[in-house]
Image: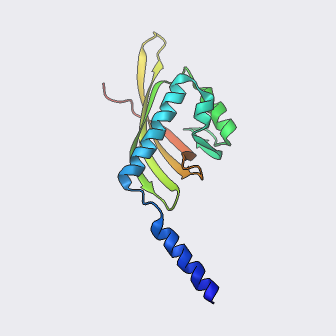
Amino acid sequence: MKRIILMALAGFLAACSAPTVTEGDLMAAIQEREDAWSAAFNAGDAEALGDIYEEGSVIIPPGGDPVWGRENVVGFLSSLFGVLLDVQLTADNVRAMGDGFAVEVGHGTYDTMAEDGSRVPNRIDYVITWHRGDDGVWRYTTDIFNASAAPAG
């Protein structure tokens, strides 16, 4: 019984001393990772892109089947290098979902090339689930996105 009480007390003290992440800090951390994703994608850097996904992650593209596993996700995304241009992802809302997990709802903009060589603006909306690993780095676990109307202008 004494051991149980000591273990409970140790857990309570550890929880009280754990750093608290504010909503603003979480939003900033996730946007920083989205900026890294955009930079890696726009540079065609598959290795840097892969560092943003967990090993067992999944991406679910619009109208497509789920793509499981970091290597396959990066392969799928690499097939879009040069097709989607100037991608920029923006976190609109991020919510902590327990210790080390978060859900983000955001949007992205990118261009594609029309047959006449002009750029066509596009927009996506997405939901990302995030996990903060033991190394303190936030990584995608689930990446779901869909096409939406082109941005104004």
Residue 16: x percent and y percent?
Answer: 45, 70
The C terminus lies in quadrant: top left
The answer to which quarter of the image holds residue 68 is: top right
Vertical relation: 83 (above or below) 91: above
Vertical relation: 52 (above or below) 40: below
Identify the image's colour scheme: rainbow, by chain, secondary structure or one colour.
rainbow
Give the camera-side residue of 28 and 61.
Answer: 28
Q: Residue at coordinates 51% horizontally, 34% vertically from top-left?
A: 37
Residue 32: x percent and y percent?
Answer: 44, 39
Q: Residue at coordinates 53% horizontally, 23% vertically from top-left?
A: 43
* 50 on left or right of 35: right
Residue situated furthest top in the rendering: 116
Residue situated furthest bottom in the rendering: 1
Vertical relation: 104 (above or below) 79: below
* 37 on left or right of 78: left
The N terminus lies in quadrant: bottom right
The number of numbered discs placed on residues in the rendered structure image is: 0
Give the camera-side residue of 109 and 53.
Answer: 53
Residue 151: x percent and y percent?
Answer: 35, 30
Q: Residue at coordinates 51% horizontally, 61% vertically from top-left?
A: 99
Give the camera-side residue of 1 and 141.
Answer: 1
Give the camera-side residue of 49 and 9.
Answer: 9
Residue 82: x percent and y percent?
Answer: 55, 20
Q: Residue at coordinates 64% horizontally, 37% vertically from top-left?
A: 73
The answer to which quarter of the image holds residue 10 is: bottom right
